[in-house]
Image: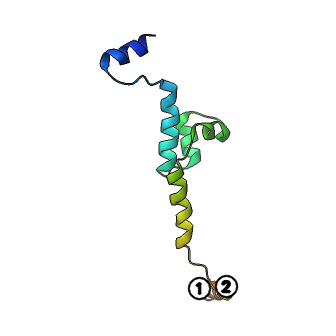
Amino acid sequence: MLGRRACQRAGVPHIRVHGLRHTFGSQVAMAGADPFAIMKAMGHADIKTTMIYVSLGKSHIREQVEKLNSIHLLPSSAPGIFYRTLAQHG
């Protein structure tokens, strides 16, 4: 293969170009890009195809789950407060 030999001569690891698509999909997803924007950027017509290219690292998944810990739940009386506020400002 010409690509493999060129990489050996240059002293860099051989990387298949198709692997870069997986890297792109995963990196932009972990950076917070919208899945449909990724789909369009990759030229896919179906989000299912895009999701094949996106793999999230365990640390990224853990960070996203940790965000749930910062959510402050409202007391059970909160929905009434919300609706009264809407009525006052509506």
The residue tagged 1 is: 89
With respect to residue 29, does 42 lie above or below?
above
SS type, badge 1: helix
Question: Callout 1: few (<14), some (14-19), or many (20+) C-alpha neighbours within 10 Å?
Answer: few
SS type, badge 2: helix
Amino acid type, label 1: His
Question: Callout 2: few (<14), some (14-19), or many (20+) C-alpha neighbours within 10 Å?
Answer: few
With respect to residue 38, does 69 lie above or below?
below
Q: Nearer the viewer, mark 1 or mark 2?
A: 2
Amino acid type, label 2: Tyr
The residue tagged 2 is: 83
Is residue 80 left or right of 19 when viewed as pictured? right
Q: Locate residue 8: give its quadrant.
A: top left
Return the x and y of residue 37 as percentages of the image width and height: 54, 44
Return the x and y of residue 57 as percentages of the image width and height: 52, 47
Q: How is the image coloured?
A: rainbow
Task: Tell me which label, 1 or 2, sits earlier in the chain.
Answer: 2
Identified at 56% across, 78% down, the residue is 72
Identified at 51% across, 53% down, the residue is 60
Is residue 59 left or right of 73 when viewed as pictured? left
Give whichever of 44, 29 is nearer the camera.
29
Return the x and y of residue 19 as percentages of the image width and height: 50, 29
Identified at 68% across, 84% down, the residue is 79
Real-space CA distance between mark 1 and mark 2, rounded to the nearest whole angstrom: 10 Å
Give whichever of 32, 62 is nearer the camera.
62
Quadrant of the drawing holding the C terminus: bottom right
Identified at 53% across, 65% down, the residue is 66
Q: Residue furthest left?
A: 10
